[in-house]
Image (cartoon, rainbow, N blue to C red):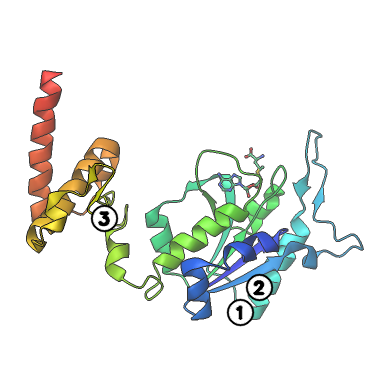
Amino acid sequence: MQFDIVTIFPRMIEAALADGIVARALQRDLLRVKVRDLREFTDDRHRTVDDVPYGGGPGMVLKPEPIFRAVDAIAKEGGAPQAVVLVSPHGRRFTQTEAARLAGLSRVTILCGRYEGIDDRVREGLATEEVSIGDYVLSGGELPALVIVDTVARLIPGVVGDEDSVADDSFSRGLLDFPHFTRPAEFRDLKVPDVLVSGHHGEIRKWRKRQALELTLDRRPDLLVDAELDVEEQEILRELMEQKGVAHGRD
Ligand code: SAM
């Protein structure tokens, strides 16, 4: 899979991709990320990427021409991208499901806005989708682009060493992940749950399922509507709901 990221701050992207799981995936060629400096697609001496907004008002707006040229160049190099993602607070919320959809594509271009945003003709005539990473405003699209690349990379086979760990991650099946512990078994009067040091694999598996379900029920019950649960999990969830129903009745 290849990401092409169009930005006025290529170093921000490159620095973040220099370490960790994504860096290893890049080294092993499981994933490619090409960072495109928007200024290279300008046609004036000053390499101008922005201009004042029509209608007045504060701030600057990224000009459309360099962005269209950048995507033309990307398409010329390797064929038209399957998705041209404009990162924007106006977009559809990015979720694990959206990440899984993008992970099924082979070429994705991400356009990073700055200042007041990007000339709206980019949304109208170039982007195939708009994605938001949450209901808050960042100063630029570089961090959202990195959020997308990192989340998608984890879903590419081979990128995360143990694929079970990705399958158990929060949101993969509509559940939050169970709590994790490591040595020592006791630290400042805080103990690891007995079951985890018991060596009973069946009990450990069941405890983890119960913890994941209870956490999800308490904190993100909205996720349970679409969660994929096996028969044992459905039974545990019924028990938990009954217990909590009793607890609520007593409140
Ligand atoms: N004036 C815009 C608004 O209020 O909707 C905000 C522009 S923001 C300062 C500059 C750029 O950061 C945006 O064009 C977008 O690319 C990116 N950005 C900011 N917040 C974002 C978010 N929550 N999700 C995705 N991209 C975001």
Q: Is mark 2 within 8 Å of ligand 1?
A: no
Residue extending furthest toward the front: 188
Inter-mark Cα distance, 3 to 1: 51 Å
Disc 3 residue type? Pro
Foreground disc of the pair 2, 3:
3
For numbered disc 3, what is the local secondary structure? loop
Q: Are marks 1 and 2 in contact (CB under 8 Å)?
A: yes
Give x and y (percent) for residue 41: 78, 66
- Crowd rating for badge 1 (residues with CA inside 10 Å; few <14, some 14–19, many 20+): few
Where residue 184 is drawn, which disc sits there? 3
List the residue tagged with mark 1.
78
Q: Are marks 2 and 3 in contact (CB under 8 Å)?
A: no
Q: Which residue: 75% across, 55% down?
A: 64
Residue extending furthest toward the top: 251
Q: Vertical placement of 196 versus 73: above or below?
A: above
Give x and y (percent) for residue 160: 38, 70
Q: Vertical placement of 175 versus 43: above or below?
A: above
List the residue tagged with mark 2.
74
For numbered disc 1, what is the local secondary structure? helix
Q: Is residue 75 left or right of residue 31?
A: right
Disc 2 residue type? Ile
Q: Nearer the viewer, residue 73 or 178?
A: 178
Q: Which residue: 29% across, 43% down?
A: 188
Instruction: Tell which quarter ligand 1 is in.
Output: top right
Question: Can residue 128 be seen by looking at this rendering?
Answer: no
Q: Vertical placement of 223 versus 145: above or below?
A: above
For numbered disc 2, what is the local secondary structure? helix
Q: Nearer the viewer, residue 142 or 65?
A: 142
